[in-house]
Amino acid sequence: MLLLNDEKNGLLDCARMICAAARTAPKGRGLDLMTTAIVSGDEKDRLVERMHLIAERDGVAFFARDAENVRQAQLIILFATSKKPLGLPNCGFCGFDNCAELQRVGGVCAFNSGDLGIAIGSAVSRAADLRIDNRILYSAGKAALELGLLGEDAALAFGLPLSVTGKSPFFDRK
């Protein structure tokens, strides 16, 4: 068997390793509140469409630019965290006096967002180890939340489109 230019077939395996790196990243109090999803095909197209809709609806042109990056990517990994305070006594890290006050206003625990950031850092580090072109996109996360792709508990999300091409589509952007 001869497999010429078969790089793209390995991308799904790489995406799974990238998700594993995010999953094993340290989490506050050892609570894993993260969700990951590998998105391609029709679901990726829906995400691109929603990003364009947000660009027009909210007047944020960079969402359209990012949508085209997602369109060019073979797939995108979504990362999300839920809103569950860790319940640390007298923490105040979120800016509120206690977790009950944070929950009353619908805020997100600082540890939830911090843990998500650390996990994404591990993910992009693994992508770099694998030499997979990528770029962290807040815009894709927002669109994924609006579409409900990550479940009703998802509170914060980011996207990580992946590409295996001769030139990264995620740089030299207009």
Image (spheres, helix red, strand yellow):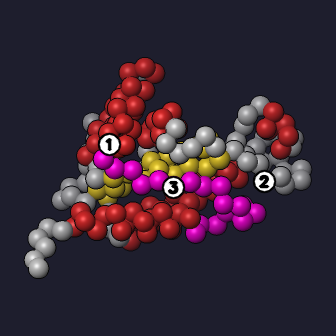
Query: Which amino acid does the dot numbered 3 rest on?
Result: Thr
Q: Earlier in the sequence, mark 3 or mark 1?
A: 3
Q: Residue at x 52, y 52 (%)?
A: 79
- Name the quadrant containing residue 45: top left
Residue 160 position within the rendered picture, expressed as x and y whole percent measured from the top left: 42, 52
Query: Which amino acid does the dot numbered 1 rest on?
Result: Asp
Q: Which residue is mark 3?
A: 36
Residue nearest the viewer, comparing 11 with 124: 11
Q: Residue at x 84, y 55 (%)?
A: 88
SS of the residue under disc 1: helix
Q: Would residue 75 be found to the left or right of residue 98 on screen?
A: left
Residue 17 position within the rendered picture, expressed as x and y whole percent measured from the top left: 43, 69
Q: What whole-number distance in Å separates the C-alpha atoms at marks 3 and 1? A: 18 Å
Query: Which amino acid does the dot numbered 2 rest on?
Result: Leu
- Judge whether 29 appears above or below 72 on screen: below
Magenta span of residues? 24-41
Taking the magenta stretch, the answer to whether it contains residue 76 is no
Q: What whole-number distance in Å separates the C-alpha atoms at marks 3 and 2? A: 20 Å
SS of the residue under disc 3: strand
Q: Quadrant of the N terminus?
A: bottom left
Q: Say few, some or many: other residues with alpha carbon within 10 Å of mark 1 (under 14 / 14 to 19 / 20 or more).
A: few
**Are the residues flagged by discs 3 and 1 in contact, CB closer than 8 Å?**
no
Q: What whole-number distance in Å separates the C-alpha atoms at marks 2 and 1? A: 36 Å
Note whether residue 60 is visible. no
Q: Which residue is mark 2?
A: 86
